[in-house]
Image (tube, grey):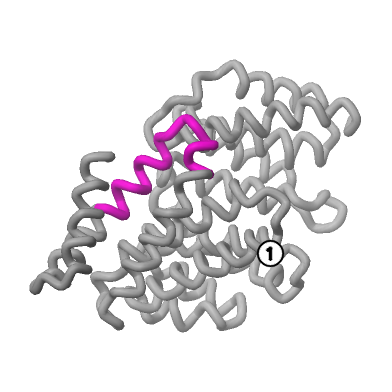
């Protein structure tokens, strides 16, 4: 990854110095760079390094997006990669700075929406439709990566705008996207779509419209399809389901399982490490919660 990143950065610098014929070269290289960068981040086991180092690469991805030819469908992979990394940073490394989290999640959602509009005109037009109209379009869609990229960015956007009732009203659209993704590919992204569905169904008690038991089944599905390697699903099951139903025994078991596990797994190392950090805090605060 380091070698490829240096090569790419060197290529960008050469082009900035005014050598001709660089535009098409950078365009071809940018998608691979964005993909490699995303993989490197996901496989890193030091969240502090990612937190401190990623902003520079977010700026680089922003520059790649800025330099794209408007309306070109070849821009989609870079837009989705930029959406994914901006959203990941917003959700995990902005701390209590809510304004910053909102800015980054806004950008992530904008990138994902732009990618959607480039590749899938019907889905793009449906984003602003009512829930029924949106659901009808999604049920006929087969663009898994695009729908999942849009759903992930939308989830981060809704998380950072949880006090905006207009934004929260779009939760059924997010759920429709995730349901379509798991229907087409239950194992997509190590079961992360199941994990999102688990959270969506466990944020409210059953008495006020929540579906916590369904949420629990989704968390368990996320763990199952990842071969037990998705530790974040267990952490969120403890935080959202076990706490919601006041099941301390399950809460502590899930979190202790997370802490005892090896966090290293292809594509999951970073989120597993973050899951263990979160698990420690939840175990400590659980003493006062239950």
Question: Residue, x 85% and y 57% (percent of image)?
Answer: 208
Q: Residues within 10 Å of mark 1 (few under 14, many from 20)?
A: few
| 219 lies left or right of 14 | right
Q: Is residue 222 visible?
A: yes
Q: Which residue is mark 1?
A: 99
Q: Quadrant of residue 112?
A: bottom left
Question: Residue, x 25% and y 60% (percent of image)?
Answer: 30
Give whichever of 164, 88 is nearer the camera.
88
Secondary structure, magenta segment, majority class = helix
Position above or below: 254 against 73 = above
Q: Position of residue 210 (x, y in %)?
A: 77, 53
Per the image, label 1 sits on a secondary structure element best described as helix
Give whichever of 183, 250 is nearer the camera.
250
Position above or below: 87 against 275 = below
Q: Is residue 144 visible?
A: no
Q: Quadrant of residue 238?
A: top right
Position above or below: 193 against 160 = above
Q: Which residues are magenta?
A: 33-51
Residue at far front of view: 17
Q: Position of residue 130 (x, y in %)?
A: 61, 81
């Amino acid at each position: 990854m380091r070698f490829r990143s240096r090569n790419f950065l060197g290529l960008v610098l050469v082009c900035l110095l005014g050598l001709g014929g660089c535009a098409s070269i950078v365009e071809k290289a940018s998608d691979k760079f964005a993909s490699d960068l995303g993989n490197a981040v996901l496989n890193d086991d030091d969240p502090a390094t990612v937190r401190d180092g990623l902003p520079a690469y977010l700026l680089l991805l922003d520059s790649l997006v800025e330099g794209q030819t408007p309306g070109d469908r070849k821009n989609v992979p870079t837009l989705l990669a930029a959406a994914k990394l901006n959203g990941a940073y917003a959700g995990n490394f902005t701390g209590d700075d809510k304004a910053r989290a909102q800015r980054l999640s806004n950008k992530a959602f904008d990138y994902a929406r732009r990618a959607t509009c480039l590749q899938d005109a019907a889905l793009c037009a449906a984003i602003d439709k009512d829930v029924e109209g949106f659901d009808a379009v999604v049920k006929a869609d087969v663009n898994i990566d695009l729908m999942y990229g849009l759903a992930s960015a939308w989830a981060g956007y809704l998380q950072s705008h949880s006090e905006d009732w207009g934004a929260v009203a779009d939760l059924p659209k997010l759920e429709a996207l995730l349901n379509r993704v798991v229907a087409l590919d239950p194992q997509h992204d190590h079961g992360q779509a199941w994990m999102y569905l688990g959270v969506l169904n466990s944020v409210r008690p059953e008495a006020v419209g929540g579906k916590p038991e369904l949420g629990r089944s989704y968390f368990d599905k996320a763990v199952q399809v990842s071969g037990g390697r998705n530790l974040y699903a267990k952490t969120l099951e403890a935080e959202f389901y076990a706490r919601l139903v006041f099941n301390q025994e399950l809460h502590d078991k899930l979190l202790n399982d997370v802490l005892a596990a090896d966090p290293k797994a292809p594509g999951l190392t970073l989120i597993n490490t973050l899951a263990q950090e979160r698990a420690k805090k939840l175990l400590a605060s659980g003493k006062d919660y239950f």
